[in-house]
Amino acid sequence: MSLEAMLIIAAVLFAIGLYGSLARRNVLAVLMSVELMFNAVNLTFVALAKYVAPAGLKENLAENLGGVLTGQVFAVFIITVAAAEIALGLGIVFAMYRNTESVDLTEAAELRN
Amino acid sequence: MAIGAALGVVLIRDLFRAALLLVLVFVSVAGFYVMLNAEFLAVVQVLIYVGAISILIIFAVMLTRDVQQGNLPNRLQLPAVLFAALLLSALVVVTIDTDWDLIPDDVQEKVSLVQTSAVAIIDTEDLESSGFTEEEQSAAKEAGLADLLIGDFVLPFEAVSVLLLAALIGALVLMRPRPPESSE
């Protein structure tokens, strides 16, 4: 598959996640949509790492060979942050559920004066 | 398949089925990683997303009792569709319009070899059959995810470990049962 096809798939995934996180009422659905967006970004990083040359790769392959893995390193970091995010997010969801007996975002208005 | 499942995640009313479809999305993204030479990432994806995150989400879906009510949209539906479609079209236009500086085909094979063996030791025979010069062979043997993580990226690596610790403690604090009213 070509780079463009991969990037477009990732863009579609991201747009779906964006729609889901904006238009859903349930906190858990929003969290799932955020995970979709994380995956889309990861896919973009890895696709670009495969197809696009880091600076200087063409001139001096030997000295820049490690650079072809940079995109994957970024994806590793994003996966780590996503794991931390989902743990904290679910903690907040449970705290909210304990207080209000609801996971409906439109009802979470305690901060509104 | 990935896109259909992702659509299901945001459109299906039954939240439990949405969570299961999310697992399907994660697995197909792992498949994409294999196609894109990132085998280590595919394994990590299956372990962390499919194994851990989706279990957590399904847990949460079952623990909260709003499941019957389902996955209702809110009043922002139309603006959200418009905004997502706008962003999608912008991204697609940029993707197609850009003149990508692609890795030339003769180098692509070498790059693939380095990327697929990011966490493994490369055979010298494989390197020779792919046309690596002597200098490039030693560079290829050194190149690896671990080398980058504790080399060039050691600062974000440490920062991420502190972030994970902080998230862990934060989640524990959030989930702690409220202490009974102190009798002072």
Image (spheres, coloured by chain):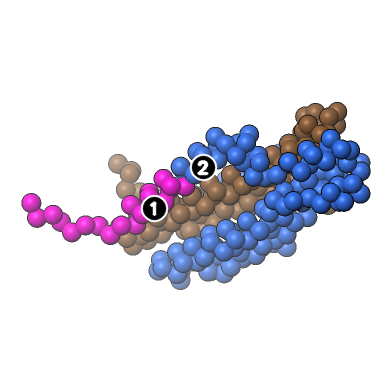
Residue in front for this viewpoint, A50 or A61: A61
Quadrant of the image occupied by residue B83: top right
Specify few, some or many for label 2: CA neighbours under 10 Å numbering under 14, 14-19, or 20 or more. some
Q: Amino acid at mark 1?
A: Ala
Give how far across and how far down residue B37 sits, in percent: 77, 51
Specify few, some or many for label 1: CA neighbours under 10 Å numbering under 14, 14-19, or 20 or more. many
Q: Which mark is residue A23?
A: none
* Chain B rendering hue: blue
Looking at the rendered structure, whether the residues under marks 1 and 2 are on a common chain is answered as: yes
Residue B91, compared with residue A85, is above or below; it is: above
Magenta extent? B164-184
Secondary element type, mark 1: helix
Depth-wise, is mark 1 or mark 2 nearer the camera? 2
* Chain A rendering hue: brown
Q: Residue at x 28, y 59 (%)?
A: B177
Q: Which residue is mark 2?
A: B160
Give how far across and how far down residue B64 sits, in percent: 41, 66
Left or right: residue B61 versus residue A80 is left
Secondary element type, mark 2: helix
**Residue A102 at least partly seen:** yes
Q: Which mark is residue B171?
A: 1
